[in-house]
């Protein structure tokens, strides 16, 4: 009979399986055995934080770079999504409380990223947003609202800089 792991033991095992001492080719398999089950052939960097592994879904051939943070709510990444280092998927939200405690009641709103999107290093995606397929989110951007497909977004808060053609491959992303 398989015994359930205590929360702190499970977190420690997740941290160990996702560390740089585990070769990248073995990392996804070990993490899958610990509960990251809704992923298909990902390439996972080291130091990734999964607050709730069962809430993360990744389509085929996603690349998640080092030290990416996945909050506890639902995060759905389409096929071939690339995520730069230290990006954050924040699903937690709070109502505004009274003056003695401004962070009121909490909830989670999911994040969805369409096929082929590229999330730059250090980007922060806030609760409830959708990034359209084929879009680029610039490094350090804070995404506060939905992003259209095949577009480039950057800044704080992130704003649309330009459209991309669906077959666009050349040039800088601004």
Image (tube, grey):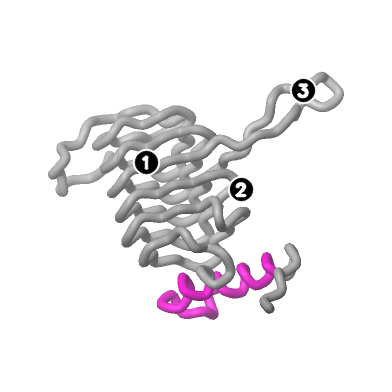
118 relative to 4 in the view: left or right: left
141 relative to 79 in the view: left or right: right
x, y percent for residue 16: 61, 74
Pointer 3 with pointer 1, Cβ within 8 A: no
x, y percent for residue 123: 46, 44
Q: Which residue is rendered at x = 48% and y = 36% of the image? A: 142
Q: Which residue is under mark 1?
A: 137
**Magenta residues: mostly which secondary structure?**
helix
Which badge, 3 or 1, comes first in the chain's sequence? 3
Residue 72 inside the magenta-drawn segment: no
Please, is residue 91 above or below residue 57 in the view? above
Q: Which residue is under mark 2?
A: 72
**Which label is found at residue 97?**
3
- Residue 161, quarter of picture: top left
Please, is residue 133 above or below residue 11 in the view? above
Q: Which residue is rendered at x = 37% and y = 37% of the image? A: 131
Closest to the observer, 83 or 6: 6
Q: CA distance from mark 3 to mark 2?
A: 22 Å
162 relative to 90 in the view: left or right: left
Residue 11 inside the magenta-drawn segment: yes
71 relative to 7 in the view: left or right: left
Q: CA distance from mark 3 to mark 1?
A: 32 Å
Q: Which residue is rendered at x = 45% and y = 78% of the image? A: 26
Magenta region, residue range: 10-30
């Amino acid at each position: 009979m398989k015994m359930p792991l205590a929360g702190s033991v499970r977190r420690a095992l997740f941290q160990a399986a996702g560390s740089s001492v585990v070769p990248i080719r073995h990392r996804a398999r070990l993490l899958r055995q610990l509960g990251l089950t809704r992923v298909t052939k990902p390439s996972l960097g080291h130091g990734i934080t999964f607050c709730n592994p069962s809430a993360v879904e990744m389509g085929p051939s996603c690349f998640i770079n080092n030290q990416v943070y996945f909050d506890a709510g639902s995060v759905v990444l389409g096929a071939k999504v690339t995520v730069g280092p230290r990006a954050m998927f924040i699903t937690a939200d709070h109502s505004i409380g009274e003056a003695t405690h401004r962070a009121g009641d909490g909830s989670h709103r999911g994040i969805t990223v369409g096929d082929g999107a590229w999330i730059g290093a250090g980007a922060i995606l806030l609760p409830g947003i959708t990034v359209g397929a084929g879009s680029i989110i610039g490094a350090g951007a804070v995404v506060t609202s939905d992003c259209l497909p095949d577009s480039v977004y950057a800044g704080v808060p992130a704003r649309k800089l330009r459209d991309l053609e669906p077959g666009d491959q050349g040039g800088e992303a601004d």
